[in-house]
Image (tube, rainbow, N blue to C red):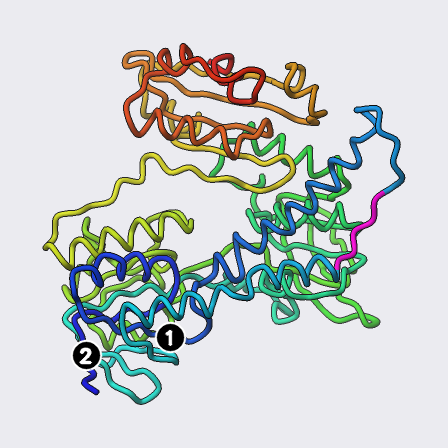
Amino acid sequence: MSNKFDIIIIGGGNGGFGVSAIAAQAGKSIAFVESLDFGGTCPNRGCTPKKVLVAAAQSMETIANAAVHGIDVGPATLDWTKLIDRERDMVSGVPGGMEGLAEKRGTVFRGSAKFNGPNTVDVEGTILEADNIVIATGSKPRNLPIPGANLMITSDEVLSERDLPDEIVFIGGGVIAMEFSHVYARAGAKVTILEVAPRLLPRMEADAVDILRSEAERVGVTVRTGVKVNGIAQADGRLQVAYEHEGESLNIRADRVVNGAGRVANVDELDLDAGNIVHDGPAIAVDEYLRSTSNPAVWVVGDALTISPQLSPVATYEGKTVGENIVNGRSATTDYSVLPSSVYTIPAYSSVGLTEEQAEEAVPNLRVSVSDMAGWFSAKSYAETAAWSKILIDEDTDRIVGAHIIGHHGEDLINLFVLAMKNGITASALKDTIFAYPTFSSDVKNMF
């Protein structure tokens, strides 16, 4: 068997499959290299299994609010072991199914890859060569430079450990910490979040994050911001976290401590220098076509790319962009201006476009429309504890430049704003559109 291919794809996640979807159809020979499980983080250890846990927590919240609807029920309890087993069962077929798809599109090589030249990679002693090499290695948990960091678990373990801890501490107040804290708290665990920054989720809309924090605290999560964590140590069969907050030296004990500081590009084992790939730590320098600025044979997509959000649909989009550029020559570039995302707390926070702070700098004639929807009929009908929106509009063009929604089925409603922003539908046109009533969608016209 020849080890010369048109394309080598390092990584079996969404980014790599986006490349292969275009390249295989064009008849390109493809080598897939994967060291763990096909499908990557999202379907195996990220967004997909996490949503199973979020759905259970949402059910707990619905039951807790049953009395509002005149329903008399006793306190609900969550069997954590059964929940984890259900979640694991739901994603168990992903790796095999994705590996089967890879085998249809190319040749699969199992093991870790590293460059040993501009056009070659070494996979556990097997040398592969290609005119195009795609780095689609995804991300890994960010290392925290604190003593005892090795005692922490990551979101991988959260999604697989079948015992519910009595007390848990998240170091870092990013998306992972916020989402899992809501699940753990509703399952009955005592949860604490320790964040070094002055506020949680610093890149997101500040007013929305304030509401998320209040909702987390409402269900019993303790949040500390502006914290310095000094170390983690074992103590009497448990873990002890030493930290400083508002001038005080404090300690907290827990059964588990979770790294909630986010994820970074997983490229440090690739030997980028051997591939003549210019990089600053994990950040690989790429041009507008997502090609390495120093090695024209190398392309980067997905979470391995540090210039774009770490989102599964973005990885697929980038992969297809690179696939087009490999097959048809450099012609396709990426546009990140309209990328929706959701933080799956309960209630969820969904957004697209600019924050108010960003819009104030970019839009000379900005209109900001803020709505507290908790008193609206639809929110009261479903006993929403928080329902809120902020819509940002360029008054000169009547275009929506940002939308932020808490609750109110915002994780679905945000896609209406995506559609409008992507296709040039004005705020006035969206406001005048007739939606089925009474629905959450019909409330969109009142958000302006």
Which quadrant of the figure has residue 229? Answer: bottom right
Q: Is residue 138 above or below residue 54?
A: below
In primary-sequence order, the first of circles 2 and 1 is 2
Which quadrant of the figure has residue 267? Answer: bottom left
In the rendered structure, the answer to whether residue 406 lies left or right of residue 100 reads right
Residue range in magenta is 76-80
Residue at (26%, 53%) from the top-left corner?
320
Instruction: Tell me where residue 23 appears, x and y as whole percent.
Output: 20, 61
How far apart in space, not on screen, are marks 2 and 1 (Cα)? 18 Å
Which quadrant of the figure has residue 111? Answer: bottom left
Amino acid carrying mark 1 in the image = Glu
Instruction: Tell me where residue 313 appears, x and y as whole percent.
Output: 39, 48
Kindly state the secondary structure of the residue where label 1 is placed.
loop
Residue at (80%, 35%) from the top-left corner?
64
In the rendered structure, the answer to whether residue 343 lies left or right of residue 332 reads right
Q: Which residue is mark 2?
A: 129
Q: Is residue 183 visible?
A: yes
Q: Nearer the viewer, residue 318 or 1?
A: 1
Mark 1 Cα shell of 10 Å, populated few (<14), some (14-19), many (≥20): few
Q: Which residue is mark 1?
A: 269
Magenta-colored stretch includes residue 435: no
Amino acid carrying mark 2 in the image = Glu
Mark 2 Cα shell of 10 Å, populated few (<14), some (14-19), many (≥20): many
Q: Is residue 241 above or below residue 1?
A: above
Which secondary structure is most common in the magenta stretch?
A: loop
